[in-house]
Image (cartoon, grey):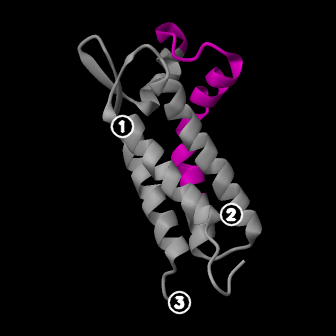
């Protein structure tokens, strides 16, 4: 079995942290804390997603666990530069949705910030150039 590289370690950590953050509380509405997965039905009503791109991003959010897993597996398996490009696209998406929430007037919680940290680790893994690897 090949030794883990810095890229695979960063990708794994980023994926786990981003996924964990997605299940933590992102915002508070009334007396209830809500996770990122509860946003799609509430985003428009709460005024979180005002533009069409924001609405599409939030409605598509439930696919995040799957695309995160795909990106991390491709990066860990040391696939081509295409894997890094895919990883960057996934990380950008995972970074954009919490940014929408954090920029809203609602009372936000720490889950969105944890997700941002995970996305940043994933970006680092994608941009990292290791010796002997593309």
Residue at image point 55% right, 72% down: 7
Q: Is residue 63 visible?
A: no
Chief secondary structure of the magenta span? helix
> Dot 2 corresponds to which residue?
84
Q: Which contiguous range is marked in magenta?
A: 44-70
The mark nearer the N terminus, 3 or 2, is 3
Closest to the camera, between mark 3 and mark 2, is: 2
> Dot 1 corresponds to which residue?
111
Q: CA distance from mark 1 to mark 2?
A: 25 Å
User: How many other residues sit within 10 Å of disc 3, few (<14), some (14-19) or many (≥20)?
Assistant: few
Image-quadrant location for residue 71: bottom right
Circle 3/circle 2 CB separation < 8 Å = no
The mark nearer the N terminus, 1 or 2, is 2
Image-quadrant location for residue 22: top left
Residue at image point 72% right, 58% down: 85
Mark 1 falls on what kind of element?
helix
Q: CA distance from mark 3 to mark 2?
A: 19 Å
Mark 2 falls on what kind of element?
helix
Residue at image point 47% right, 43% down: 116
Image-quadrant location for residue 87: bottom right
User: How many other residues sit within 10 Å of disc 1, few (<14), some (14-19) or many (≥20)?
Assistant: many
């Amino acid at each position: 079995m090949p030794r883990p590289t810095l890229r695979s370690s960063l990708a794994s950590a980023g994926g786990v942290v981003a996924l964990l953050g997605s299940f933590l509380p992102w915002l508070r509405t009334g007396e209830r804390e809500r996770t990122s997965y509860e946003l799609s039905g509430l985003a428009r009503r709460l005024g979180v997603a005002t533009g069409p791109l924001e609405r599409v991003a939030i409605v598509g959010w439930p696919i995040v666990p799957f695309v995160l897993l795909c990106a991390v597996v491709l990066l860990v398996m040391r696939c081509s530069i295409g894997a890094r490009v895919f990883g960057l696209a996934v990380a950008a998406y995972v970074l954009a949705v919490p940014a929408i929430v954090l920029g809203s007037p609602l009372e936000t919680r720490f889950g969105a910030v944890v997700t941002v940290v995970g996305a940043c680790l994933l970006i680092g893994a994608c941009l990292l150039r290791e010796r002997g690897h593309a």
